[in-house]
Image (tube, coloured by chain):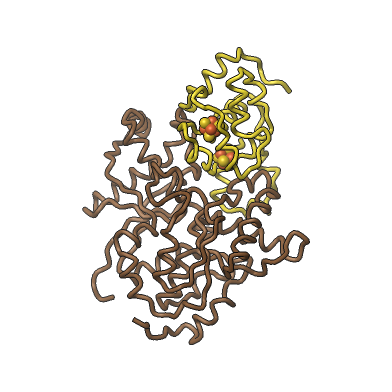
Amino acid sequence: MSKNLTHVPYYPGCSLKTKALGYERSAMDCAKAIGFEMHEIATWNCCGASFPLTKDNLMGLAAPANILLEAEQHCQEREIDANLITLCSFCYNTLKRTDFAFREEPKKLETLNAFLKRQYQGSIKVVHYLEYLRDVIGFDNLAKMVKRDMSSLRVAPYYGCLLLKPQKEMALDDPEEPVILHDFLEAIGCQVVDFPGQVDCCGSYLIMRDPEKVLELSHNILQEANDYGADALVTACPLCQSNLDQSEGERRGSDHYIGVQGMPIFYFTQLLAVALGLDTEPHQFERHCIDPTSILSACLEDGAKPIEAKK
Amino acid sequence: MQILMKSNQSALKELELATGEIVSDCYQCGKCTAGCPASMDPSPSVLIHYLKLGLFEKAVNSESIWSCMGCLTCSERCPKNVSPAAIVEGLKRLHLNRMKPRVILHALGQEFLANSTQQAVVSGFRKFV
Ligand code: SF4
Ligand code: SF4
C-alpha cells in the first residue's frame, strides 16, 4: 500500500506476548497489508484477564482502568481517534465491560480516578480486531484484497464465550447465533461450516483447577465440528485456542478420541494472512499441537508466492 | 472445616450487596441450569434455591461453585435478569475470604505453569485464590 497507514492504538495483553505470539504477529502483518498499523500503547499492564462479576469489586477495575487511561493519553498526545484495538477475547471483554461500568455508574469512575490519582475522561472506544475489520474496513472490501484461493478449506467458526457475552455490554453480535466470524471467513473465501457448539465453552480458566473437565468440554466441541464436516476451527481467543489444541494433542490415540483426527485450531488472523498472500513463516504454526500446515497446502501451492486474485 | 456461622439473613445480605443481585428475583425456571456446561451439582438454580430457603451455609460450602468457569451462558439466558454467574462468584469470594485458597498455585508445578496460557493463570489467581 502506498498510502499512509492509519495509526490504531493497540493493547496486547499478556497471552499475546507469549503463548499467542503467532496471533499478534499475523494480526499486525495483516493490518499493514490492509492499510492500518497497530501501535502498542507505550505503557500497559495486565488487564486482570477476567472481569470481576461481583459488582462491589472495584479493585478488579483498577488494572483495566489504568489501561484505558494509558490509551487515552496515547491518543491525546497524537491527536488521533480514540479507538483501542484488542485481540484477546478476555482483554476485549474486561476492557469493554470496564468502560461500560464507568459509563453506567460514573461514581465508580470517580472512585477509580481518585485511587489512581489520574483522570480518565471516558474517550476510549474498545474495539476487537474483528470488529474493526467488519465496521471500519468492511468485509466486502476485505474480500477484494484476497490473493490466495482459500476455497479448499472447510472451516468452522468458534466463538467461545467472552467475545460475545454479556451481549448488552459487548454489543458485538448475537450471543447465541453469531455471524461475525462466519461472514469474515466467507469474505476471505473459505467454505464455512457452522455448528451448534460454536458458542459452547471450552472450559476456560478451569484448566487451572480441573484439566480433565476442560479436555471433556473441548473434545465435545471438536467432535461436533468434525461431525458437521469441518477440517479446522477458527477462533479469536488464545485460551480457546490452547484448550482446544492441547486437548486434541493429549487425547490423540486415547479411547476417548474417536473420529477427530488432527483438526487444527487457527487464529482468524493466521488464515487472513494466508488469504492476503502474506508470508506465514513468522506466524508460529510450529507452536500448535496439531500441525495446521498440511491442510493449508492447497492454498499455499505456490509456496509463499501469492496467486492472482479471482476478482 | 466449618465456615464461621453467620446468621443466614446477614450472610445473604452480604452476598446481595457484593454481587448486586437480588436472589428473590429468581423464579426457579431452571433455564440457567439447562445451559450450564459445567454440569454443576448442585446446579446454579439449586444453589439459588438454597439461598432462597435460607440455607446459606449449604450454598457457600457446595463443591460445585468451584466448577463454574464464568462462561455467562446462565446470565445471558435468565429471563429474570438474574446473574447466577455473579451469585456463584460471590459465593466463591465469601468462601475465600474465610478459608484457604482453592488452588495452591505453586503446587501446580513449573512445567504446568510454563505451558499454561497467561490469561488462564491470571484468572486462576482471581477466581481460586
Ligand atoms: S434462569 Fe434466572 S430465573 Fe431461571 S432459575 Fe436461573 S436464575 Fe432463576
Ligand atoms: S457462568 Fe458458571 S454457572 Fe453460569 S453457565 Fe457458565 S459455568 Fe454454569
Q: Position of residue A222 (x, y in %)?
A: 62, 61
Where B3 sits versus A47, above or below?
above
What's the residue at 41%, 59% (across, down)?
A180
Task: Please tell me which residue lies in front, A196 or B88.
Answer: A196
Where B111 sits versus A286, above or below?
above
Task: Please tell me which residue lies in front, B55 or A237.
Answer: B55
Horizontally, is B95 left or right of A41 in the view? right
Horizontally, is A289 left or right of A128 in the view? right
What's the residue at 66%, 62% (across, down)?
A248
Q: Residue furthest left?
A: A79
What's the residue at 45%, 32% (across, down)?
B81
Is residue B125 something that shows in the picture? no
Is residue A82 something that shows in the picture? yes
Chain depicted in yellow: B
Q: Quadrant of residue B93?
A: top right
Name the quarter where the N terminus of chain A is drawn.
bottom left
Q: Residue furthest right?
A: A255
Q: Position of residue A48 (x, y in %)?
A: 49, 43
